[in-house]
Image (cartoon, grey):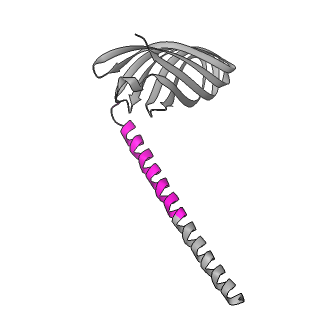
């Protein structure tokens, strides 16, 4: 009886080890696919954007903050005016900015409006320059470059909501 228990235990341990190896192999394969996708997206963002935009924005921060602005998206030979509002966590100050943006992975105009998240850091005293990267749930990525005026310190998370103007 004792030999049968030892044999059964050995078989179960072998099965558990085989299952663990398969699980680790699957996890490793999923990580490799995710890494390859991230590298392909990064490479695509080094090329020409799918769309461009110009915008003007105002932002007030006191730990929590808010922003609003407007702009024009240039996509497939057409101009699409939009508005944006945002919330931030982290930072103090007030700035007014004018900027440009490159938009990547935008295939349909319907994918542009929505909520975008990003993380940024910067400081402004008088005239400043800055940039951020935002992404929405449809994987559209917006990279911004802006020049502004004001006094501010920014280190935190931002969320913006973009709506097309009809």
Residue at the far front: name it.
1
Q: State the image coordinates of residue 128 (x, y, percent, origin top left).
A: 54, 19
User: Can residue 113 be seen from the camera position used here?
Assistant: yes
Quarter of the image containing the N terminus?
Answer: bottom right
Looking at the image, which residue sits at the far left?
Answer: 77
Tell me the chief SS of the magenta region.
helix
Residue 118: percent from left, percent from top: 55, 30
Relative to 72, 84 lies left or right: right
Along the line of sight, which residue is nearer the eye, 91 or 66? Answer: 66
Q: How many marks?
A: 0
Q: Is residue 78 above or below residue 140?
A: above
Compared with 7, 166 (above or below) is above
Q: Quadrant of the C terminus?
A: top left
Quarter where residue 2 is shown: bottom right
Residue 61 in the image: x percent, y percent?
66, 18
Say which quarter of the image contains residue 104: top left
**Residue plotted at (64% across, 81% down):** 8
Start and end of the magenta stretch?
Answer: 23-49
Residue in the image at 30% along x and 17% along y: 78
């Amino acid at each position: 009886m004792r030999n049968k228990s030892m044999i059964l235990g050995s078989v179960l341990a072998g099965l558990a080890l085989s299952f663990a190896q398969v699980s680790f192999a699957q996890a490793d394969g999923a990580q490799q696919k995710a890494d390859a996708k991230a590298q392909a997206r990064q490479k695509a963002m080094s090329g020409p954007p799918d769309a461009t935009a110009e915008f003007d924005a105002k932002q007030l921060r006191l730990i929590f903050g808010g922003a609003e602005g407007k702009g024009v998206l240039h996509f497939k030979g057409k101009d699409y005016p939009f508005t944006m509002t945002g919330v931030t966590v982290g930072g103090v100050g007030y700035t007014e900015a004018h900027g440009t943006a490159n938009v990547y992975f935008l295939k349909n105009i319907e994918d542009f409006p929505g909520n975008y998240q990003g993380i940024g850091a910067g400081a402004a005293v008088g005239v400043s320059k800055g940039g951020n990267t935002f992404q929405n749930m449809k994987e559209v990525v917006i990279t911004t470059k802006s020049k502004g005026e004001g006094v501010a310190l920014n280190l935190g998370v931002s969320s913006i909501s973009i709506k097309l103007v009809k």
